[in-house]
Amino acid sequence: MRNTLLRPALAYTALALLLTACVGPNARTFSAPSLGYKTLTQRELAGLPEPKDKIIVAVYSFRDQTGQYKFQENVSSFSTAVTQGATAMLIDALRDSGWFVPVERESFNNLITERKIIRANIGKDAELPELLHAPLMLDGGIVAYETNLTSAGLGAEYHGIGGSSQYRKDQVTLYLRASDVLSGAIVQSVSTSKSVLSAEVKVGVFRYVEIDRLLEIEAGLSTNEPPQMCVMEAVQKAVVSLIIEGILDGLWDLKDPADMNSPVIKAYLSEKNGDVNRERSAYLLQRSRSALERKEWNRAIESSNEGLGLDPYNDALYAARSEAYAQTDKLDRAMKDAEWAITLNQNNGLAYNNRGYVYERNGDYRLALLDYRKSCSLGYDVGCANSKRLEATKPELVR
């Protein structure tokens, strides 16, 4: 009887030791610095078509106007709920868009002081280059931060073994406006919002394994979206919105008017007008896949084009069109669609296989094999077959 009772005790003890090892002295307590996080909205900025002329803009301040402090239960906190560095984020987004040339205004007094120092050193009569003047001024700020907009939880326990989960959603909202410096008129104003999500999962054991022996184990995991990253995404989205709304209103022009059909602009218009017909796009995706199976490449391209007109962020449609382009030797288009599909969904096995096919056709066998293997790891059988085929024909790649 005693041996029977010891077995679960030993099992629970082993589990406890395993969990303890995860947070023991061998746990990694440092990480290397990294470059800035690449958001999906940052890819939208990079995907904007080129402007006819870049616009010089002045940004004096883009600050937190909420006055809110970080929420902590039963604790007074003097930390602000959102970042105080939104001006720097806005300037960075303006530069990344390729549409604007921001000029220094936030530290304008420091700039003037440095110019005075230069004049004092090289002589008062020395001429310095004139400062750029901005015909457009951008202003606005973070206007709201809503805490606990949505919260939920779920838990269960049976015979001392149980678990629970919690979920919370906050939301940050900002406004961005553009003003004509000469007239003072506000020529454009946009607003964006971004959810800040938090989740927590806990499991635990609390039970007697013998009459006088109590076992207690706890484990948990929580994930929190950094509010500053959410502000950054909202700022980037606002810049995308400002640019496209300005194009629509004739405030600035595209270098190539045909770029009005670019994926970023079409996606924005679909989101704004609320005309993303997902049921129709799902039907068109199925029709495109059926055409691929029948090797009707042009029909597959037509169906994908129509579907992307309804749902420009559908990675499966990009992947399907990529395969059709690849089979019709339009390798540049196939590569572009495959990479866009991977950007939207890094688990798209067909897209990796298509990109690998283009690499192979271009003679980049090592990159092709990497993509085929990735496609295979995502459960795409054709990717597995292509990987084995390439390994057999190019054995030097696996040495």
Image (spheres, grey):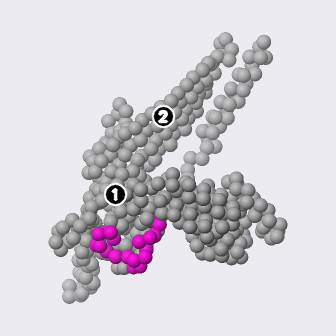
- Residue 149: which quarter of the image? top left
Image disc number at residue 166:
2
Q: Nearer the viewer, residue 107 or 37?
A: 37
Give the CA distance from mark 1 to mark 2. 30 Å
The quadrant of the picture occupied by the C terminus is bottom right
Q: Is residue 51 above or below residue 153?
A: below
- Residue 321: which quarter of the image? bottom right
Residue drawn at point x = 64 percent, y = 43 percent: 26
> Could you tell me residue 162's position as x and y percent?
58, 25
Disc 1 or 2, which lies upstream in sequence? 1
State if disc 2 and disc 1 touch (CB < 8 Å). Answer: no
- Badge 1: residue crowd in 10 Å (few <14, some 14–19, many ≥20): many
- Residue 140: which quarter of the image? bottom left
Residue drawn at point x = 68 percent, y = 26 percent: 12
Residue at image mark 1: 86
> What range is drawn magenta here?
246-264
Q: Residue furthest left?
A: 183
| Tag 1: amino acid | Ala
Q: Nearer the viewer, residue 212 or 385?
A: 385
